[in-house]
Image (cartoon, helix red, strand yellow):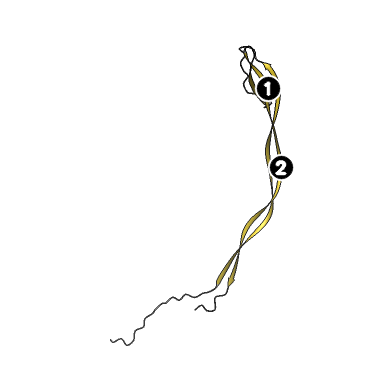
């Protein structure tokens, strides 16, 4: 038997454009109101004159805090008399006042939006 003709198959891939897509990003800004409570403290300094001479052997007072939170800081001065004694010149009192306030602020919040647009295939594509 003699073959007269033989058929063969050949598969070929050709890339063709079926369409295009355009993606556009845009940023939007929206106002938003933010409410927050802010805490604050204020320190009041009060000077109280004492002008009391400490007795011989009396221990110098140390800084202390009252029950209401006020700090009392003694200020001592050495004075020359016939003998040296400590004179409690003054006390510095620090009084703490706490407070809070509500603050409203308008801020701009941004977000990005993607717009997708389908385009026909380019005319010059094979």
Q: Which residue is mark 1?
A: 90
In three-dimensional space, the C-alpha distance between marks 1 and 2, rounded to whole angstroms, equals 39 Å
Residue at 64% x, 56% y: name it. 110
Residue at position x 58%, y 70% in the image: 118
Circle 2 sits on which residue? 102
Give the foreground label among 1 and 2. 1
Q: Position of residue 31 (x, y in %)?
A: 69, 54
State the mark number for residue 35. Answer: none
* Residue 4 horizontal/vertical position (percent): 32, 88
Q: Give the residue displayed 69% in from the left and 42% down from the top.
A: 37
- Sort mark 2 into few (<14), some (14-19) or many (20+) by Cα contacts within 10 Å: few
> Relative to residue 96, is residue 121 depicted above or below?
below
* Residue 71 vertical position relative to residue 86 in the rendered view, above or below: below
Looking at the image, is 90 positioned above or below residue 55? below
First of labels 1, 2 by sequence position: 1
- The residue nearer to you, when weighing 12 against 87, is 87
The number of numbered discs placed on residues in the rendered structure image is 2
The image position of residue 40, as x and y in percent, is 68, 37
Element type at mark 2: strand
């Amino acid at each position: 038997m003699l073959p007269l003709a033989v058929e063969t198959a050949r598969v070929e891939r050709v890339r063709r454009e079926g369409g295009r897509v355009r993606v556009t990003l845009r940023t939007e800004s929206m106002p938003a109101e933010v409410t927050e409570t802010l805490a604050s403290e204020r320190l009041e300094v009060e000077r109280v004159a004492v002008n009391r001479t400490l007795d011989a052997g009396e221990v110098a007072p140390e800084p202390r805090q009252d029950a209401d939170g006020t700090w009392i800081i003694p200020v001592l001065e050495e004075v020359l008399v016939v003998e040296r004694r400590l004179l409690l010149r003054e006390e510095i009192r620090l009084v703490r006042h706490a407070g809070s306030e509500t603050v409203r602020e308008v801020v701009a919040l941004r977000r990005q939006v993607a717009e997708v647009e389908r385009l026909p295939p380019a005319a010059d594509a094979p």
